[in-house]
Image (cartoon, coloured by chain):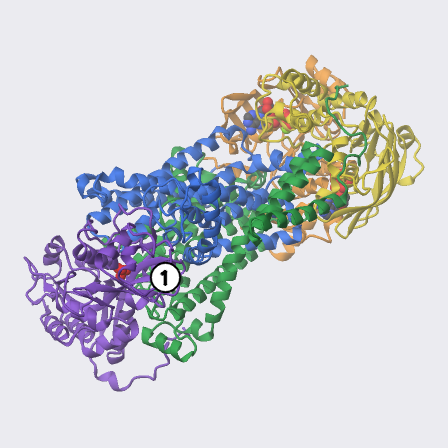
Chain colours: A green, B orange, C yellow, D purple, E blue
Amino acid sequence: MIDTTLTRSASLTKNQLPGWALWATFAASIVLGAAFSALLGFSIATFAIFAAVLFVAGSTIATRVVEGSRRAADRFATNLIYGAFILALVPLISVIFTVLVRGIPGLSMDFLFTSMGGMTGTVDNETVASGGPVLGGAYHAIMGTLLITLWATIISVPIGLLTAVYLVEYSKGGPLARAITFFVDVMTGIPSIVAGLFAAAFFGLVFGPGTRTGFVAAVALSVLMIPVVVRSTEEMLKIVPNELREASYALGVRKWRTILKVVVPTAISGIASGVTLAIARVIGETAPLLVTAGFVNTINLNVFAGWMASLPTFIYRQLMSPTSPTNTDPSTQRAWAAALLLILMVMLLNLGARLVARIFAPKTGR
Amino acid sequence: MSKRIDVKDLNVYYGDFLAVEDVSIKIDARSVTAFIGPSGCGKSTFLRTLNRMHEVLPGARVEGEVLLDGENLYGPGVDPVTVRSHIGMVFQRPNPFPTMSIRDNVLAGVKLNNKRISRSDADDLVEKSLTGANLWREVKDRLDKPGSGLSGGQQQRLCIARAIAVSPEVILMDEPCSALDPISTLAIEDLIEELKSDYTVVIVTHNMQQAARVSDKTAFFNIAGTGKPGKLIEYDDTTVIFNNPTVKATEDYVSGRFG
Amino acid sequence: MSKRIDVKDLNVYYGDFLAVEDVSIKIDARSVTAFIGPSGCGKSTFLRTLNRMHEVLPGARVEGEVLLDGENLYGPGVDPVTVRSHIGMVFQRPNPFPTMSIRDNVLAGVKLNNKRISRSDADDLVEKSLTGANLWREVKDRLDKPGSGLSGGQQQRLCIARAIAVSPEVILMDEPCSALDPISTLAIEDLIEELKSDYTVVIVTHNMQQAARVSDKTAFFNIAGTGKPGKLIEYDDTTVIFNNPTVKATEDYVSGRFG
Amino acid sequence: ACGSDNATNAAADTESSDSALTGTLSGAGASSQASAMDAWIAGFAKANPNASIQYSPDGSGAGREALLAGGVQFAGSDAYLKDEEVEASLGTCGPDGALHVPAYISPIAIAFNLDGVDELNLDADTIAGIFRGEISTWNDPAIASQNEGTELPATAITVVHRSDESGTTENFTEYLAAAAPDVWTTEASGEWPAELDGQENAQGTSGVVSAASSTDGAITYADASAVGSMGTVAVKVGDEYVAYTADAAAKAVEASTPVKGEGRPELDMAMELARDTTESGAYPVVLVSYHLYCTTYDSQETVDLIKAFGSYVVSEEGQAAASEAAGNAPMSAALQEQAAKAIESIKAAS
Amino acid sequence: MSSKSIQGTGGAGRAGDKVFSGITLLAGCLILTVLFAVAAFLLWQALPTFTASSDDISGGSGFLAYIFPLVIGTVIAAAIALLIATPVGIAVALFISHYAPRRLAQGLGYVVDLLAAIPSVVYGAWGMTVLAPALVGPYNWLADNAGWFPLFAGPASQTGKTMLTAGIVLSVMVLPIITSLSREIFLQTPKLHEEAALAMGATRWEMIRMAVFPFARPGIISAVMLGLGRALGETMAVALVLSSGGLIASLIRPGNQTIAAEIALNFPEAYGLRLSELIAAGLVLFVITLIVNVIARWIISRHKEFSGAN
Ligand SMILES: Nc1ncnc2c1ncn2[C@@H]1O[C@H](COP(=O)(O)OP(=O)(O)OP(=O)(O)O)[C@@H](O)[C@H]1O
Ligand SMILES: Nc1ncnc2c1ncn2[C@@H]1O[C@H](COP(=O)(O)OP(=O)(O)OP(=O)(O)O)[C@@H](O)[C@H]1O
Ligand SMILES: [Mg+2]
Ligand SMILES: [Mg+2]
Ligand SMILES: O=P([O-])([O-])[O-]
């Protein structure tokens, strides 16, 4: 029979790192990490870095010596992957912590349900002097963000989905499809402000100069959103197995029904996350909104007329030009509270998308 | 409801590669026809041309005519979707829809086409089709569970149930039993026997005994070598093919008493 | 290089569902053992426990012992990766790596352990394995083409070539021939015959003739009803099982002279 | 549907319904005015509940562009129109072009973050030297010699300037270029000189203030209302050191000369500030932010609104409201009067 | 059970197909149109810059001299962001799809998606108030100990507002994009192929390299491209976090500037030629994205034959 070039251990358990070895490595790297860190003047960050590096190196080398290079590579990869995850959590926790600590004090019913109408620096000065609750709220901005994002979604998701469907299901890789794919990629790199300027200029041309409405902003955001929707949907549709399409065709089902009822539902989980991602990407945009929706302190619920506030512009203005320049704390508090709200909104959206995905997703019973 | 198929001088291509060359064959209505031949000789490929599933693959195309009761499937103005709803198909690999329950999988052909069907009709259809595919007993208590939770053999039978649920006139089966155990295989063979009285059945099989048992006529395909096109070598009554073939290659192939 | 397998009181679960109950079986080194039984009775499930592939599925677990030459596969400190490199597997559905060429597919397992295999050794190994799987002739001119461009049967043979290329001590095959034509089936059966002289081979098959032809011993599994666990009903020399089984169910099953 | 625009819980105003003004005015421009504008808008809304004003603090340049393009009815700008802009305004803003009215006056503080030091006396040359990076430690003799008795540490000076183009920068560099021409050899501009590369910078007034407040040894320049608890510089004018105050700033504005020229309307109030003034008690590092109106509007309704709003802004009451909210310097009475007159000249196209 | 002819039937259904494919085509064309409109808008607005004499351009020595440092700055920022976010993002996606305990994985995915939910102003504010001050110490240490290396040449910024900080903030913003798309694709890797690898005795990592990565490669590239788009186009975060300036090799000193931030910072006060200049800068960014994408496409297409589909 085929001569084996493998070097395999005869026993199944030989050359195994005992279970306690990793814990020992862990303990050693903690101790050594603390020691090294102390040499440089102890800090949590250097300690964590030293300990992590020591642990990764130590466990990899130990594995390498005892179990061989393949296991070592596996252990190394595992360590790095866990490490990467922890690393990714650091900024996340830091940002969330910052937003929570600074945002929670500002959240109140008043903040949720009033606008900034009538607010002036004088009011804030008095608030600071008297120590009373911070007045003024983000209701106008919340509604603005909801409406603008809703419209942007209404515009982008159908266009994005349909385009992705065209690319994956219909195009057969022709020059038009290649052009679309290519330019969609290019579109992802349009700076957000340019999208805003473009929408402003376009509506300026059509409806007269200075046309600023929620809808103009929605169009600007759509320019930013569409490529994300197309790109993520395209990837998700591509990995739907052809077998399923064929099964459907063989039942005499039309292509468009196959797409809508078999292909899209199979990919819906990924599509939903892509759309969520796209919404999250634009819901926090500031620059394009500044030039398209204008900026107001009062409530406007009509996206087709009048200027409109939004949470990101609200945050930006409160941070960059506080209501009272002399007492910026109330403005800062409002800004962080609004940031917290914005994050909560996207969280809810995310939950919603997951629910959608769960309902339609392929049942993996097997 | 059954229909006759006449294939005239059919060449099947994948892009520039000629996979099946110059096949002419007459398949009778109300009969079972088996395609046999070594792997890669183009049985699946040829089968797929009979309901225009071939053209779903990019670059795939055919030359020649396939007549269904005298009408050319590849004629101008013929809608492949209509063709496929007349000519059903079961694939080599089971492919239930992962997003659908077992019940919905069976009803897929009906529901995906947006045909309205009453609840009780649907229940009857599900039961009838699953019984026909010898699966009813095993799944009747979990019709609402996903179809992908079944074993390979169960999945294949589910696909058969799905195909017969739309009652096509011709049923094409590409090695439908290759994943099945003998009991299910027997059930499917019984089913084919039953279907024959109303439908035209074409089946690809690697199993000589199966071909001998179920088919009225047998077509033997062969291939001269890699990169060469597959060809129809001999086509005759099954008894003739298995007992008294005219071509040497056929005899060689069927005389090995395989599988 | 061959090894003996002793299974003791093995229960196999999918989450809470007991799929296979209380199996004890001794599989001799240098022999071919066939698992037969109706669909869904847990043959594949049980087979997968023999190289710890079962636990790859979420929620899947086993109770009991599987001893490979006396060493428990499920013992503490046993690495499933080591187990699997001792015990190779061929699946029911062909699964070549689509992104690798045919050649790389064959070498995939070998390269894991031996990155610096010389070009000529690799060539030899590829040719030997592919020849063993009866695929060499068909693919020798396109070794650098992707493995996914092959027909179903060709793909399955490629997977067999890939499994034997690493020369495991035990080879598990889950219906390896279900997608194959008789010629390839014969080739695989010859291959199994050959492997037997060095390795332990376990094969799941729906094909009674195949079981009868290739195996030394046969295990018959059965299932009492849906939702019930599969059980090992009878295990004996193949001639005994097919000609003189002690259990009625076995006799019923093997006497239907199926596929 | 359940939100309210009454953030301050003000009692509903019933007495003010005698105002007949309706409609919406849109303005855009300088962000320096944003806080004051909030106060004006709130004050104006109280008196005219049926009219509304909206202002987008996009920046002076954007405001001027928008006004000249007809996108807004008024603009706020930290700088007056350049000649070519005046030319453009002649067509789009009526035959007499656009009108500058000063609305917001605020001293620019030179603020630093130095432990234990709250005030420093510096002359223009020293300030320019510091901001050019030529004087790089706080105990430099040039600084010490002007601040006898102050304990100066050897801390390195970190200059923080604006990263965005800004009216504050323009006014500050104008002062440096005029008062310290030997040291500050760069032309005044809204953008910080590119040749002074490698200094710290931040976006917006709040950006520089926050960067400077959190960096030991930092110095920056910012609207005086925003500098918070940082130490500030008293600037040498003539022979004395003047700290920024509202009065000192107003005095500097009074010493200015009007800008005259082709195409500027007669009552226009664009002014050239005398940065190198030696007048006693004047604080020349000051920013004057204008409102720009058209001299002629298409509809009488707009004219009524503009006049009502414009005169409110420059009224005693409007200036007081702004300075209370934004902490800036109110305009002097004389300036208020002149401004009111200018606004009166706005008319509808016949 | 119709025994109708295959000819002429299904007219209505066929129309459905035509209409649907027509609509999808229309959607695609609409995108192209918008894109051309954006390009045309940029060109039209940028035109004065290209015709102006070089003295009138900011910096006084022509547009090329003006834009060059910005291009380099943009590339540096995006490169730092991707260099950090790509490996970390893929690793996090793998962690969620193949490493984390199954029960945890869903929740973890959600947590990382949260990063995408944070608006860029908040990242900017966080970068400015939390991250930058925290990095002053490490930067000083780098300048003291690795100052010989041009990228870490001192003296380090005393506010921590440097290119490296901006790059880190960008990488945090880009991370969820890469992670969430890659994760979805990793989860879709055919079980067949994963099992094939495992059954051969591959370790988990080897299985990932053999079955998961090849399958996911085009998807990963797409994800990275999306992330790159964000990194290139991000305005607010960079504007708030970076002490901008001229071109400089050191990443821990004030200096460098990105195109997007340059536009955002100067747009408010810009008019006339300056405005046109900024828009021309936008156009250049457009071109950069174009070039990067050409390269990415090329990489993907090189391996087309071996793509994981089917
Ligand atoms: N999608 C495809 N593109 C290109 N060539 C293909 C494709 N599918 C099959 N072929 C080739 O066409 C020929 C016929 O393949 P086909 O699948 O029809 O064989 P088969 O007779 O069904 O074999 P099996 O019994 O193994 O299923 C083979 O050479 C095969 O490699
Ligand atoms: N992943 C899974 N999760 C839950 N149950 C499963 C899973 N896979 C299989 N089963 C169930 O376990 C039982 C045994 O299945 P298995 O696939 O082992 O059968 P088999 O004997 O191999 O059948 P076949 O001959 O059809 O391949 C069946 O009832 C099946 O439905
Ligand atoms: Mg086939
Ligand atoms: Mg099985
Ligand atoms: O008011 P600024 O132009 O300095 O922002």
Q: Quarter for ligand 5?
A: bottom left
Residue in the image at 83% along x and 21% along y: C197
Taking depth in this image into account, of D192 and A330 the one nearest to the observer is D192
Q: Please provide percent x and percent y for residue D69.
A: 18, 57
Q: Please provide percent x and percent y for residue C135.
A: 67, 20
Which quadrant, please, contains the C terminus of chain D?
bottom left
Residue in the image at 45% along x and 67% along y: A337
Taking depth in this image into account, of E300 and C224 the one nearest to the observer is E300
Q: Residue furthest bottom?
A: D15
Residue labelled 1 has its Cβ within 8 Å of some atom of ligand 5: no
Taking depth in this image into account, of C217 and E229 the one nearest to the observer is E229
Read off the residue under disc 1: D113
Q: Is residue E27 left or right of residue A54?
A: left
Q: Please provide percent x and percent y for residue C118.
A: 65, 18
Res E195 seen here: no
Mark 1 residue type: Asn
Q: Is residue A94 left or right of residue A323?
A: right
In which quadrant of the rendered view does residue A304 lie?
Answer: bottom left
Q: Please provide percent x and percent y for residue D126.
A: 25, 56
Res A53 seen here: yes
